[in-house]
Amino acid sequence: MTLNLFSPRRRRILTVGSAVAASPFLFNIVKAQGAPIKIGFPVPLTGAFSAEAQDQVRAAEIAIQDFNDAGGFGGRKAELLVRDDKLNPGEAATRTLELIEKDKVNFIVGSLSAATQLSINAVARDRKIIFNSISQSDAINEAKDWSLYTFHEALNPHLTAGAVARYAFPKFGKKIVYLTADYAYGHEMVRGFQRAGAPMGATTLADIRHPLGVADYSAFLPRIQALKPDVLVLCNFGRDLVNSAKQVTDFGLKANTKVIAPVLLYTSRQAGGAEAFEGILGGTSYYWGMEDKIPAAKAFNDKFRKAHGGAVPSDYGALGYAGVRSVLQAVINSKSTDSIPVSIALRQLKYNWYKGDQFYRKCDHQSVQSVIIVESKSAGAMKGDDDVFNIAHIDPPSEANLRSCAELGHKA
């Protein structure tokens, strides 16, 4: 039977169809199905840690591309919204609030400071938005700052300093001087070294503190030399690490003292050069040279090389990749972009994105992972501009190397 286009029945069908199409409910469903999954990414693009932050962005973009190339989530693609927190806690809080309330991001990943990540976390936590931090901090896992929405992809100072101390102190001596950046990162690193060193008889000759961003360390070096330490620990980061390593080398302290750093950065080593860093030992979350033995490292490196003209990723770059990819994988696993189901999926996640097996500890959402101990090569030992470290040891992932849940204030 042919339907008359002007019949009452036809008019009723058109009316019902128009009403459904105009329904806000249907519009919202269609919009939600096609809306991008937005990840806010506040990092210090300007300031002392800018080189590391820019590499975080480069690698995070690869995680976004991986997700989108695989089809996204129900056809929804991901977007990275990068903001400059200027290495300032107040600025970080402001940018995070804008990302959540103005840009309507689904998740926050980022930070490159123990201080800024706590301010980012406070804003995200209060608004029930997941924040996956990619910067070292002990405090972020403590119950007073933690929430169901707080995850920590990066190593923390207790884990990093402990691994380096257990490797270095028995080999190089137990009389220790710390040259410490006077903020949370430096303080937490010193505490980690001292706690790990105490059972093996390590003693602190001095903890010499300097302001963040200081350029001249000459006032500290004669005192360090006079103390005659077996080991000098540079508990600083970014440009501070570069400047202190250069001046320690120029002053001749390496002649009788082993210089180590809790976090020996690829970007700092590249900026400072072979001579300044020669023989300095330290820990890191990742070194691209692991690709010879770890297939996931080779796969990640190759994607980064393809995207960035043959360059290799840095340690903090890799954290940008893992922090974003973990959240997006949890979206897929939970079949949701809502914070609670994604949080549950992250707690259950076991992953190997670039360095070997990792998982989030249930009580505090700290990523349990390996710590790589590296030593900076001399210019003559390098086989290329990127070949800057020897891998001395890999400390395997173990919850036993973390502070206990009870110490952090968690019940389990």
Image (cartoon, rainbow, N blue to C red):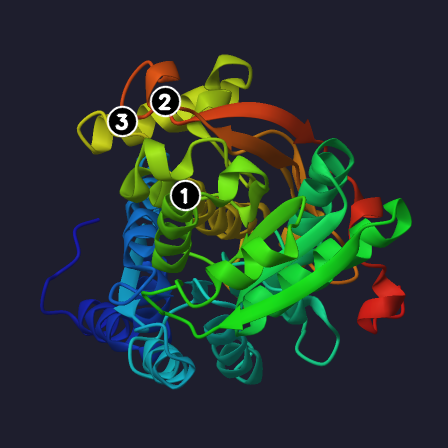
Quarter of the view holding residue 369: top right
Q: Residue at x 28, y 63 (%)?
A: 81
The dot on residue 387 is 2
Horizontally, is 386 left or right of 259 in the view? left
Q: Nearer the viewer, residue 10 or 155?
A: 155
User: What whole-number distance in Å separates the C-alpha atoms at marks 2 and 1?
Assistant: 21 Å
The amino acid type of the residue labelled 2 equals Asp
The local secondary structure at tag 1 comes to helix
Residue 94 visible somewhere in the drawing? yes
Q: Residue at label 1?
A: 249
In the image, taking residue 101 as reference, residue 196 lies left or right, namely right
Tell me where residue 330 appears, x and y as whole percent: 56, 50
Amino acid on which the number 3 mark rests in the picture:
Arg
Per the rendering, the mark at residue 218 is none
Give the amino acid type for the residue marked by disc 1 in the picture.
Thr
Give the class, few, some or many, for how many residues have Cα within 10 Å of label 2's Cα (few <14, many ≥20). some
Residue assigned mark 3: 305
Q: Secondary structure at mark 2?
A: loop
For marks 2 and 1, the one nearer the N-term is: 1
List the single residue furthest toward the left. Answer: 6
Position in image of residue 337 (x %, y %)? 49, 61
In the rendered image of this protein, does residue 33 appear above or below residue 11? above
Number of numbered discs visible in the structure rendering: 3
